[in-house]
Amino acid sequence: MAANTITRAQLSEAVYQEVGLSRNESADLLELVLNEISDALARGESVKISSFGSFAVRSKGQRIGRNPKTGEEVPILPRRVLVFRPSQLLRSRINNGHADSVEP
Amino acid sequence: MTKSELIARLAELNPHLYQRDVERIVTTIFDEIAAALARGDRVELRGFGAFSVKTRDARQGRNPRTGESVDVSEKAVPFFKTGKQLRERLNTVR
């Protein structure tokens, strides 16, 4: 299966085809959607998109890491990371797509 | 924030659009991402993050209730890697 990479261009094209706004406005709205989600996450809020999945911010404590090249110990500072949890629907959609290509 | 709160927020910022259209915009975006992943494609949104599909090998699992061993076949799971810009934003002092 050829793995293509989809970018903003194809997503905003889909919005353009589906909704009938101008190409420019479609691109702007896609950007706005990503920005609003990012803003909520930066505030520490989680974002739940039903039938797709949820994004949550998790706080990690400080721990001792190691520079893999030198073996030197370096502290890894407390930080916030983003975790994405796919919905059951997305999981099964991806597996069906897979199963179909394996056994036609 | 939920999908409907996101839609309400976008509608508020775009009073010239019908609520119906705002809903379709959001639905289309996530549907396209899901469809791409179902085809085995990657979705890369610079600054935000990238969605991809990872394969988990078939393994011998166990029914936790009965202890019976079961075959778990190979499966694909969606994966999200946070973009650099968003990762940095999460860690800037507010």
Image (tube, coloured by chain):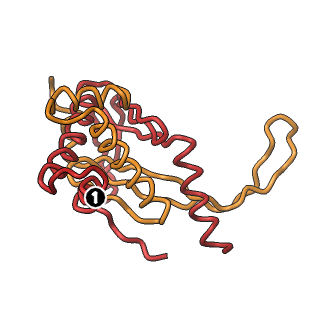
Chain colours: A red, B orange
Is residue A58 at least partly visible in the picture?
no
Furthest residue toward left: A24
Out of B35 and A55, give the one closest to the viewer.
B35
Task: Left or right? Give the position of A72 relative to A83.
Answer: left
Please rate how many residues cluster around mark 1, counting C-alpha atoms within 10 Å: few if below 14, some from 14 to 19, many from 20.
Answer: some
In percent of width and height, residue A22 lies at 15, 54
Q: Which residue is mark 1?
A: A17
What is the count of numbered marks?
A: 1
Residue B89 lies, in percent from the top left, at: 19, 36
Answer yes or no: is residue B50 visible. yes
Q: Nearer the viewer, residue A19 or A58?
A: A19
**Horizontal side of residue B11 vs A103, given as left or right:** left
Q: Quadrant location of residue A43?
A: top left
Q: Is residue A36 above or below residue B56?
A: above
User: Which chain letter matches label 1?
Assistant: A
Image spot of residue B65 (x, y percent) = 83, 34
Residue A98 image offset from top left, x and y in percent? 58, 65
Rendered-image quadrant of the C terminus of chain A = bottom right
Q: Secondary structure at mark 1?
A: helix
Q: Nearer the viewer, residue B27 or B70?
A: B27
Query: What residue appears at the point 87 percent right and 45 percent down from the top-left corner?
Result: B68
Residue drawn at the location 33% of the way across and 30% of the way down: A62
Residue A76 sits in quarter:
top left
Location of residue A51 with respect to B28 vertically, above or below: above
Q: Is residue B81 left or right of residue A43?
A: right
Q: Residue at x 49, y 43 (%)?
A: A86
The residue lying at 64 percent from left, 72 percent from top is: A102
Type of amino acid at the residue the image marks with label 1: Gln
